[in-house]
Amino acid sequence: KLREQPYFLGFSGGADSTALLLGLWQSGVRNLTAVHFNHHLRGTESDEDERWCRKFCETHGIALQAFDFQVNKEIHKGEGVEECARRLRLEAWKRLVNKEQRPIFLAHHADDCLEELFLRLGRGSNASGLTSLRPERELDGLTLCRPFLQLRKHDLEEWLRGQGVADWRVDRTNLDASSSRRNAIRNRLLPLVREIFGTDAGFRV
């Protein structure tokens, strides 16, 4: 049934979404469309990401649909860059799903869950709000599927290398701890948590 049903998959070209796309394809899922969002936030690197994704999909015979956003020109009053990019992606997903009622695969993994947990703690979420990301969720008429939530990013990278994939796209802005709260959690807080506790396993939900 999984192989027969049509799906969309968010494909940034990073290790996580590349592993998900390749894994589904190798498992026999053929009615699959990779969806790439070019936010034009990193100059030529954004275009290079799109070119890489197109080449990967062409090489493997996978359908690709790309969306072109000018995020810096489409920010609403009181909206940050990340919020704007998220809104534009959600609007694009809704347009796609309205045409074809397909579930959407997303490659969020265990590291994303940790970051989301600390973000929600910082916002003062109650107990129910601390459950972090879920493997399947309905959101504004969209069915989101996240099969990688129990896997770490380094596991996905190791698997890709085992499949002969030695390169993928890296968003260098993710290494800048000053650019967003999520990046600060990823690059400052979580390394400190691991130093103090020797592991971050106790924070995984």
Image (spheres, grey):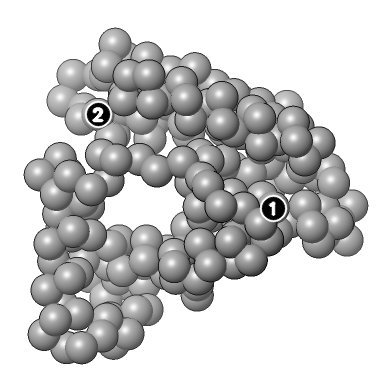
- Extreme residue in the top direction: 73
Displayed quadrant of residue 170? top left
Under mark 1, the amino acid is Leu
* Image x and y of residue 148, in percent: 55, 66
The residue at the point 31 percent across, 25 percent down is: 42
Residue occupying the point 27% across, 16% down: 72
**Which label sits in the foreground, 1 or 2?**
1
Vertical arrangement, residue 184 with respect to residue 98, above or below: below
Place of residue 155 in the rendered image (x, y in percent of width and height, measured from the top left): 50, 71
Counting from the top left corner in percent of width and height, residue 177 is at 14, 49
Dot 2, crowdedness within 10 Å: few (<14), some or many (≥20)?
A: some
Camera sees residue 106: no
Pointer 2 residue: 81
Report, in whole angstroms, how far the alpha carbon at label 1 lies from the one at label 2.
30 Å
- The C terminus sits in image quarter: bottom left
User: Mark 2 and mark 1 in contact (Cβ < 8 Å)?
Assistant: no
Identify the residue under disc 1: 22
Q: Nearer the viewer, residue 112 or 44?
A: 44
Q: Nearer the viewer, residue 112 or 162?
A: 162
Seen in the image, is 117 located left or right of residue 23? left
- Do we see residue 90 in this rendering? yes
Q: Secondary structure at mark 2?
A: helix
Amino acid found under the numbered disc labelled 2: Val
In the image shown, does 21 or 136 lie closer to the viewer?
Answer: 21
